[in-house]
Image (cartoon, grey):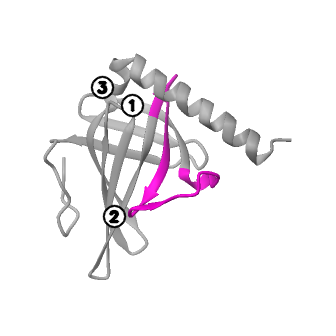
Amino acid sequence: MFTVVRWKALRSRLFVVGLGFVLACPAAAQSMSGKWFGTAPSQGGVSCWVNERRVDGSYELNFLVVRDGAVRRHREEGTWFSANGLYASITQRINGAATDPGDRRFREVYRVLELTARQFRYADISSGREFVVRRVADNFALGDACPNVT
C-alpha cells in the first residue's frame, strides 16, 4: 500500500525525470512550448484559455469564463513535461495561492493525439475528454470576451 510519504517521494522523482526529459530533449519541449489558445462550451456559457508552456518546464494557464453576461478569470501556474506520447502538468498555484501537492486534482495526464506547428489535440487520460488548442502569437492575451481564433 502506498503511503502519502511514499507517493510524494515517487511523484517528486517522476516530476524530476519528466522535467529532465523536457530539458534534455529540446525538440519535445520546443514543439509544445509557446502560447496555445482553446475554447469550449461551459455550463450555459463559454470558456476560453491561453496556456503558455515554457521550455524550462513551467507554465501559466489563464482562463476566461463568460456566463450570463458575467466574466470570471482564473489563473494557474505550475510545471509540465511530455514523454512517450503523454503530456502531464502539475498545478502549483491557483490565482496566486499555493495548491496542496498531495491533491490529485492538481496532477493531470493527457495522451497527445496530434501535434503540429499550429494545432495541438490531446485527451485527458482519466475522462477521455479531448481538447484542441491553436498556437497563438507570443503577445496574445485574453480580453473581456472569448475571441474567435482560427
Q: Earlier in the sequence, mark 2 or mark 1?
A: 2
| 16 versus 63 height, above or below | above
Q: Are marks 3 and 1 in contact (CB under 8 Å)?
A: no
Are there few (<14), some (14-19), or many (20+) residues within 10 Å of tag 1? few
Q: Earlier in the sequence, mark 3 or mark 1?
A: 3
Look at the image and give the residue range highlighted in magenta.
81-106
SS for dot 3:
helix
Q: CA distance from mark 3 to mark 2?
A: 27 Å
Are there few (<14), some (14-19), or many (20+) residues within 10 Å of tag 2? many
Amino acid at dot 2: Ser
Q: Which residue is mark 1?
A: 114
**Is 124 displayed left or right of 25 in the figure?**
right
Residue at image x 34%, y 64%? 47
Residue at image x 24%, y 28%? 117
Q: Which residue is mark 3?
A: 30
Q: Is residue 103 magenta?
A: yes
**Is 6 displayed left or right of 122 in the figure?**
right
Tag on residue 47? 2
Q: Quadrant of residue 64?
A: bottom left
Q: Position of residue 3 (x, y in %)?
A: 80, 45
Residue at image x 63%, y 52%? 104
3 or 2: mark nearer the eye: 3
SS for dot 2:
strand
Q: Position of residue 18 (x, y in %)?
A: 51, 28
SS for dot 1:
strand
* Foreground of the two, 70 or 15: 15
Are there few (<14), some (14-19), or many (20+) residues within 10 Å of tag 3? some
